[in-house]
Image (spheres, rainbow, N blue to C red):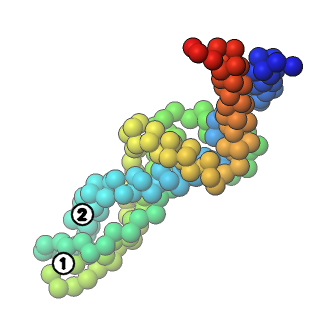
Amino acid sequence: MSRESGAIHNAYLWLRLYQRTPEGSFRFDLVMHDLYEATLIKAVRRLSKSKMKAHVLELIDAGPETVPGDIEIDRVASTGRMSHHLKMSAQEKESVDKLSRIRGFPHAYRNEIVYTCTVRYRIGGSTHTQSGGQAFVTVPPLTVTKLVKWYVFARGAIVSPWFFDHVTPFVLGGMSICVALSNWWQINYPHA
């Protein structure tokens, strides 16, 4: 068997692997979606610190129990959740088709995050703590979601079986085809 036929066989097997791959295999599975959501919540929390602080200050100023004086914020602690989880009914959460539902959400609905904040602040000499209130709701820009998605793809290659189950066979198959073709070229055209 010549090296050329080895490359042809590899290409044939690679094509058959692609044909037999179930639809949606190259898209994130539920574990990768969970990793994406957790990472997006952390990234947007960090990027939206000043907006969140302004939101909290607005709530404190509008509060009926706020005494006059300069407000100095010591700490804002927030907990984020994806709003589409909050809007799903219990039956929808237990649905077998949860993955296709998540994949079908439009950008604004899929990536909307709701943060509940606990703030510790000082007015005058007294320290106050406020929890709850109106949640801080934000939809990150498309560039942020794309960057987070790429980060999750790279991180998922290490921590999730999705990458090794669905992507690695194609990468290794493509590499073996390239090596076989390169070897064939070097043998048949050594001075080219």
- The secondary structure type at the circle numbered 1 is strand
Relative to 86, residue 166 above or below:
above
Locate the N terminus by quadrant: top right
Q: In this view, does 61 lie above or below 112?
A: below
Q: Which mark is residue 57?
A: 2
Give the camera-side residue of 111 and 145: 145
Query: Circle 1 is placed at which residue position?
Result: 123
The answer to which of 40 and 133 lies nearer the viewer is 40
- Whether residue 166 sits left or right of residue 128 in the image: it is right
Of the numbered discs in the image, which one, if any, rests on residue 150?
A: none
Left or right of residue 1: residue 165: left
Q: Distance between the residues labelled 1 and 2?
A: 12 Å
Query: Of helix, strand and loop, which one carries label 2?
Result: helix
Say whether marks 1 and 2 touch (CB < 8 Å). Answer: no
Q: Hey, which residue is sitting farthest right in the picture?
A: 1
Q: Residue at x 21, y 85 (%)?
A: 126
- Residue 35 visible, this orientation: yes
Residue 30 vs residue 12, the one in the foreground: 12
Q: What is the quadrant of residue 139 in the picture?
A: top left
For the point 48% across and 35% down, the residue is 107
Give the quarter of the figure containing the C terminus. top right
* Residue depicted at x 50% and y 42%: 150
Compared with 185, 133 (above or below) is: below
Q: Which picture quadrant has residue 70?
A: bottom left
Q: Is residue 79 left or right of residue 128?
A: right
Q: Which of the pair 135/149 is nearer the observer?
A: 149
- The residue lying at 65 percent from left, 20 percent from top is 186
Residue 35's place in the image compared with 171, above or below, is below
